[in-house]
Image (cartoon, rainbow, N blue to C red):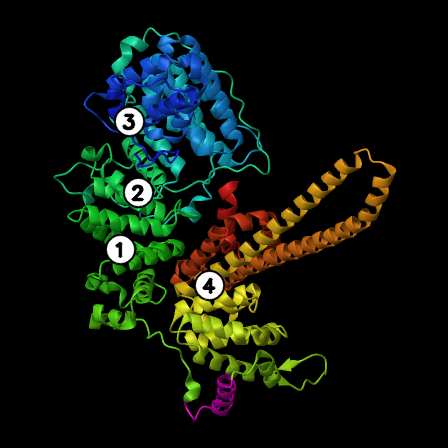
Amino acid sequence: FRKMSFRQDRRRHGDEEMETDAKRRRAPESQTELERRIVDLIMHIGEKPGQTSLESNLEKLVTLLEGELDKIGGRIIETIIECAKNLPDKLTIYSTLVGLLNAKNYNFGGEIVEKLVADLQLTLEKEKHRHAVNLVTFICDLANCRVLSLTSVVEFLEGLLEAAGEDGVPQVRSDWFVYAVLRSLPWIGVELKEKKTEELENLLGGVDAYMQQRSRTHVRILQVWTGSTHEQEEYLDCLHEQIKLLSGANWQEKHIARMYIAFDAVLGDALQHNLPTLAPPPHSPSSNYPLPHVVFRLFDYADCPEDGPVLPGAHSIERHLIDEELGWIIDLNEMNRKDCAEVLLNYTHKAAVPLPYVVLETIFSRLFSLPDSPQPRLFYGALLIELCRLQPNTFPQVLAQAAELLYDRAHEMQPACLDRFVDWFSYHLSNFQYRWSWQDWNDCLEADVLDNKFILAKEVLEKCMRFSYFERIQEILPESHKRLQPAKPDVIYPMEDEAHPEFERARHFQALFQEKRTAEDMIEELRVEGETGEGPEFDSHSFAVFFAVLLKLASKSFSHNFAALTRYHKTLKQVVATSPEMQQTLLSTLYGCWRNNTQMLLILIDKLLKMQILDCAVVVTWIFEGEDAQMEHSRQWLWEMLNNSLEKLGKHVAKCKRDLETLKEAKQRKMKKEENDDQEVRGDYVSSVISILQMDEDEAAAEMDGELLTKEAEVEALLESQKRIFLDVLMKFARALTTRLQEQGEAAEKSLWYTFVQGRMRHVFLAHESVIREFAKELEEQLAAKSDLDKRSIKVFSEFAALRA
């Protein structure tokens, strides 16, 4: 499943070394060398088939380990448990290994069982839920290998289900325990059906009862498509249906490699152990649990070739296991796209499934995963290109089919996912000479500007222009599709026309720039006599002309723009500090000059925020209320700017909080050092010298206290400002939706505008989930207090709040 193990060990020993290991004559090994060799053998067992079978290699490994249990038994146990946590694709190999060792050494079996439960306890306390799920499944499979009694495993699963029924805990916690039980049943279901039928029925009945009363408010915010046409089940609902179907088939499946069957004669006589009691950690307000997700489906059996393997049904357990295993491959090889693509194409069950279809569905499920993708989204684009390179006769065609399906469903796609589709598809086209059959997208040409298909096509072409150049896009686009063509990304500067009313003023500023006047000189040029006489005043019209001229002269490149902003930073900072209106003027001027080059707009606004010339709150106001921005509400760049601004604010807050923690730690270290110094015995002379030095230390301590108080005040003010800005953003969304509902009634909810704006509201909630969660209670109270808001306009908040409820 991997090119690198979970320990990032690039040496590949595996079964080939196992075959020759017994034949080698070695010099006596040190214990460290012995441990390293045995750890390597355990980690890589089953990875590279050799001339002998895996069963034979397992027997050889057992013989080797049995002789070393007295010396390094603890290290062997630790390695097996780590492998069970991190290499779930080989779980049945390790459970069989433990079973064979237990059959030969009962005490070893008892030790690993105790350590396994202790490790699961610690893993749950550390909130490493993915590892914990793997350990739960491993424990269940140990019953198949006669290491654990079936009764104790049933009690273990009942304990997990009991934890799911605790009162006063979030649903996400209960969901995890139910998921852990359901996910382990494909491994142990047959054994339970044969020997513990009543207990199995009780377990399934408990799960059914939980699923019936479970809330599903959160599902809508996580779905890729807003309509109900396409299958998009919530993950626990889907797994529950898959388990019910498996139960109806008497738990018979053909996917899990049950290694222990080959050793049934040996394992059948082994003595079994009982599991120690597991005490799930109690819930606390700071506890974190995995967020729910929606199972992404793109293909069904009808999309696949008739002469190839059949795609398993959506509710077959095989589909779940395939999705999970392909996901493990991606997770384990995420640092190297080439290795990842190669391992995906050599998937163990590739002969039994339509490989390109299941691989692409898994990759797109991760690309469109909400709130965020497990890996950086660029990784998926690079991985898809690598797959097309390795299999040029199959993957490009299936990928084109996937792109067409996604386009067909784009009208119902969440805006957050539509943005990701745009980013991936434009990147992909840039690597294949922008070849695409644009005629297949003809239906978007007459669509409304808020129709997702039109937005998709227009944004893809604009992103393609960023990767290439304007004339290239003109070449690839058919004449009939000129409505989609982006504008030429040049700076707009109408003041070159002598008839323009600001021509003379612009020429004056241009001369000043060419004379390389300083920032201070420009401040004086912009200053006007104020009526109040209190502080400097500036004319917004002059400032707009000044900034437009600056942008025109610096329009040659990004670096020219950055240099100009840096040179006149003081001018810009002092002028915009006089009022928020000046910041609005700056934004409007920037938009007026660069509205045909949205990449330049985004980069310059980001730079102005970083230089603290622009304030995030002003950017938010301009996006929602600015006349210029109103025309751009269907464009991706505007919402990208909103989320970038909020994210930059969040990073600034996080940095200040880290600085505050550093100061607090420094003060604690200093206080501890002073306490230790005071406890030392000193002579009279030493004490007198220290008294003199103490005066300097007191001054330093006072300075540190002052710095600490200043930083605490700064962080407190920033947190309050951040909260206020987010509340303002979400309230602006709610008011806009309420206004539309009041104007159009029930028809509003079905309109393109309403769906789009509500989708963008969901996008903000998801993109900043961790920040908004911190003041969700206060937001809920404020929304409840606004009696003028239509309840439907704040439905998104209910969906968001339910994510961790």
Q: Is residue 270 left or right of residue 534?
A: left
- Badge 2 density bin: few <14, some 14–19, many ≥20, Cα 10 Å: many
Looking at the rendered image, the disc whose residue lies closer to the viewer, 4 or 1, is 4
Q: Amino acid at mark 1?
A: Asp
**Sequence-first tag of 3 and 4:** 3
**Is there CB contact under 8 Å for labels 3 and 2?**
no
Residue ID for mark 1: 408
Q: CA distance from mark 2 to mark 4?
A: 30 Å
**Is there CB contact under 8 Å for labels 3 and 1?**
no
Residue ID for mark 3: 14
Q: CA distance from mark 1 to mark 2?
A: 19 Å
* Residue in the image at 24% along x and 54% along y: 404
For numbered disc 3, what is the local secondary structure?
Answer: helix
Q: Position of residue 276 (x, y in %)?
A: 50, 16
Q: CA distance from mark 4 to mark 1?
A: 28 Å
Nearer the observer, 432 or 802:
432
Q: CA distance from mark 3 to mark 1?
A: 46 Å
Where are the magenta residues, as a range? Answer: 497-515
For numbered disc 2, what is the local secondary structure?
Answer: helix
Q: Is residue 687 left or right of residue 258?
A: right
**Sequence-first tag of 3 and 2:** 3
**Sequence-first tag of 2 and 4:** 2
Would you place residue 145 above or below residue 507 in this image?
A: above
- Badge 1 density bin: few <14, some 14–19, many ≥20, Cα 10 Å: some
Q: CA distance from mark 3 to mark 2?
A: 28 Å
**Sequence-first tag of 1 and 2:** 2
Looking at the rendered image, the disc whose residue lies closer to the viewer, 3 or 2, is 3
- Badge 3 density bin: few <14, some 14–19, many ≥20, Cα 10 Å: many
Residue ID for mark 2: 362
Q: Quadrant of residue 414?
A: bottom left
